[in-house]
Structure formats: C-alpha cells, structure tokens
Image (tube, coloured by chain):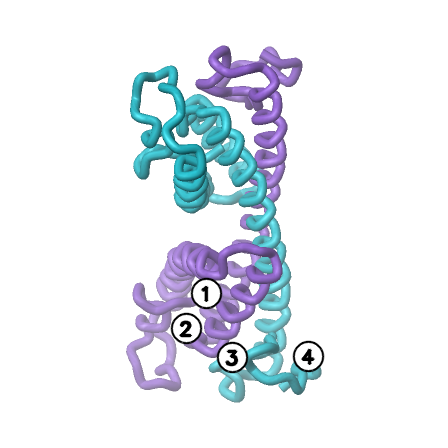
Chain colours: A cyan, B purple
Amino acid sequence: MTELNHDLPDSESYHPAASSLAGHVDPAVMAELLSIRSSIDNIDATLVYLLAERFKATQKVGFLKAAHRLPAGDPGRETAQIARLRRLAEDAQLDPAFAEKFLNFIIGEVIRHHEAIAEDHHNAAGRGPGGDGGGPASSAAGPTTPLNA
Amino acid sequence: MTELNHDLPDSESYHPAASSLAGHVDPAVMAELLSIRSSIDNIDATLVYLLAERFKATQKVGFLKAAHRLPAGDPGRETAQIARLRRLAEDAQLDPAFAEKFLNFIIGEVIRHHEAIAEDHHNAAGRGPGGDGGGPASSAAGPTTPLNA
C-alpha cells in the first residue's frame, strides 16, 4: 500500500502500513497516522533492545547474589529506585504513578529470571554451609522475595 | 557512602549506593554490584524518557482519531505490531512472550489516555453527526476498545 511494503512473506516481514482502517480513511489523515506510527515503531524497537540490555544486567546481579549467598531483596535499593524514577518521570512529563507501575512490572519479570538462576545454582551446588541469617538455603530467592538488583 | 553521594536532602537526591546490604557484604562484591546497578540506573532513565516520548506520539494519534471520528481499535495494526516486537525480541535475546506482555502493558496505559482524550473531545463537541458504523457516538472509544495507535 506504500513503498515501504516488501514482497517478503507475511511471517517474515513487517508492514508499517498494516491497518484495518486502510481504504476507509481520508488519505491525508491516513498519511499523518502512518507518520506518527512510524515514530512509535522506532521507539518500540529501541524499547525492546533496551529491555534486553537491562535483563542482561539484572542477570549478572542474579549470578552475583546467588554466588555470594546474598539476600534476595534490597529494600533500601528498591525505595531509592522508585523515588528516582518518579522524579525522572516528572521531568519527562510522564505520569509518575505509571513509571512506578512500570518498574514494578519489570521487577516482576526479573524476579522470575532470578528464581530460575537461584534454582539452578542451588541444584548445581547442593546444600552449602548455613547462611548468615539462619534460614534454609533454598529461601534465598523464594517466590515472594524480590531480587530486582 | 561513596563519592557519588551529595549533601542534598534525601527527597531531592538519589543515592546510587543506597542498599540494605551496605556493611554486610564483602567490599569487592559490593563494588561489583554497584557497578552493575549503575548501568541499570542509566537504562532505567533512558526507558523513562523513551516511554514519555512514546506517550507523546500516541497522544497525537488519540487526538487525530478523535478529531476524525476514526474507530478506536485497529486489529490489523495490533497484530502486525505484536508479530514485529516478538521478532525483534528474538534478535535481542529477550523472551518474545515478555515483549508481547510488555506491549500489552503499555497499550493498557495508552487506552486509559485515549479514553480521556475521547471523553474530552466528546464533551467539547457535543453530539456530532452520526458515524459511519451506525453505533452511538460515545462508543468510538469505549472502555473495552483498544485505541493503541
């Protein structure tokens, strides 16, 4: 529908002009819509690559904590992170409540990753010496404990 | 605790070394943890500003759709977006299922924004001429209809 379309099969190509509105909208309005969507698509690609990089970093934290038997949660860190993101959101004119919700959404995924790391580490190491907190070794990254870096 | 700390009051400063682990962890391990966290903090700031930019773009789409009485949802667009983000996630070694969940999370927020725009537009314009779909004018951006750009 535009010159941005290619002749690749659907499963491998992306059609920036893909829309159920095509043919039902004034061409000038459609052009404006597609122009904004093109920016959204660029931003989304950047978000995906940036999130991938963030998970690489939190994965390192997961390995570090598992290797040194550090407690999963770090409330002091989490409080500081949330307060900072809310301030940055205000600067960026983004809803601070959304920024906080976003961080919690990401942390939820990080927790799932860290649980897998801790489980692998636990399985590989067997039961090590008692920790400094007196708890069972397997509680270091329990399902309800945030381990969000 | 490090030279990164400033003498600003807590409510206005961010302490990159804020941690409930401080003093309980081998200094070399803590230094490595703080180094990774510093990268996470940079990524998070970028994410916040990028999300703010994305919401600016979807806000434009919301105004455009409201002004031209375009249908709220665009299933063809949404299907293409999801397929593309899953492919990008694979390239970036990010879980494609997480990328899709992330897009849906963002869209949920966009819907709330667009509902507010459509409501404002509806209130400002009063009841306009009948739409092309025969539905009530107020259904253009109903609460269950995605309007995600």
Q: Which residue is mark 1?
A: B148
Distance from disc 3 to disc 4, alpha carbons, whole Å, reads 14 Å
At 54% from the left edge and 62% from the top edge, which residue is drawn?
B60
Q: Is residue A111 visible?
A: no
At 38% from the left edge and 15% from the top edge, which residue is drawn?
A132
Q: Nearer the viewer, residue A135 or A22?
A: A135
Distance from disc 2 to disc 4, alpha carbons, whole Å, reads 23 Å
Distance from disc 3 to disc 1, alpha carbons, whole Å, reads 12 Å
Closer to the observer: label 1 or label 4?
Answer: 4
Q: Which mark is residue B73?
A: 2
Chain to which mark 2 belongs? B
Closer to the observer: label 2 or label 4?
Answer: 4
Q: Which mark is residue B33?
A: none
| Amino acid type at mark 3 | Ser
The total of numbered circles placed on residues is 4
Q: Nearer the viewer, residue A105 or A142?
A: A142
Where residue B149 sits: x, y (%)? Answer: 50, 67
Distance from disc 3 to disc 2, alpha carbons, whole Å, reads 10 Å
Distance from disc 2 to disc 1, alpha carbons, whole Å, reads 7 Å
| Amino acid type at mark 2 | Gly
Q: Is residue B30 visible?
A: yes
Q: Is residue B95 above or below residue A110?
A: below
Q: Which residue is mark 3?
A: A19
Chain to which mark 1 belongs? B
